[in-house]
Image (spheres, rainbow, N blue to C red):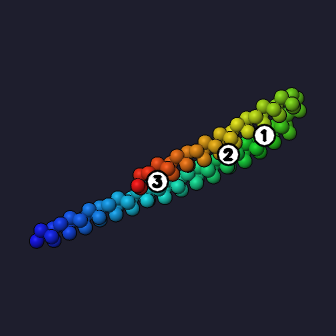
Amino acid sequence: MDQAQVMKKEREDWTRLYHKTLKRIKVIIDVQRMLKDMKKIAEEMSTTVMEMEGTILMASINNWTTNTMNITQIAEDLRYLAQSDMDDRVLQIQKMLADELD
């Protein structure tokens, strides 16, 4: 009788662990989707900034050199910030989720 109770408890423990692991995997998948969406948004933002840059440069004849330098620097900063920060965040989150599964 004791053996049956021990086996039942072990089965329940494994069942709990299995469901807990499935929930964590679901969270990882959800986070990966969100990160993919965030990267897509960052890429779209970068494209929009480049389009704005072109439009402003074409419209601005006065102070063309200053405007070009300022707009180009802003665009580069935004692109760098979006891409580098996004990649770092993705890597950090993936490491945290992998550690959580271990």
The numbered disc on residue 97 is none
Question: In x, y percent, where is residue 21?
Answer: 38, 60
State which quadrant residue 19 falls in: bottom left
Residue 95 shown left or right of residue 88 in the figure: left
Question: Residue sitting at 73 percent across and 42 percent down?
Answer: 49
Quarter of the figure that contains the C terminus: bottom left
Query: What residue is shown with label 1?
Result: 53
Locate residue 59, reporting x and y percent: 85, 37
Residue at 41%, 55% (x, y): give it.
101
Q: Is mark 2 on a helix, strand or loop?
A: helix
Q: Earlier in the sequence, mark 3 or mark 1?
A: 1
C-alpha gap between disc 2 and disc 1: 12 Å
| Quarter assignment of residue 57 | top right
Q: Determine the CA span between mark 3 and mark 1.
A: 40 Å
SS at circle 3: helix
**Residue under circle 3?**
98
Q: What residue is shown with label 2? A: 45
Q: Which of marks 2 and 3 is nearer the N terminus?
A: 2
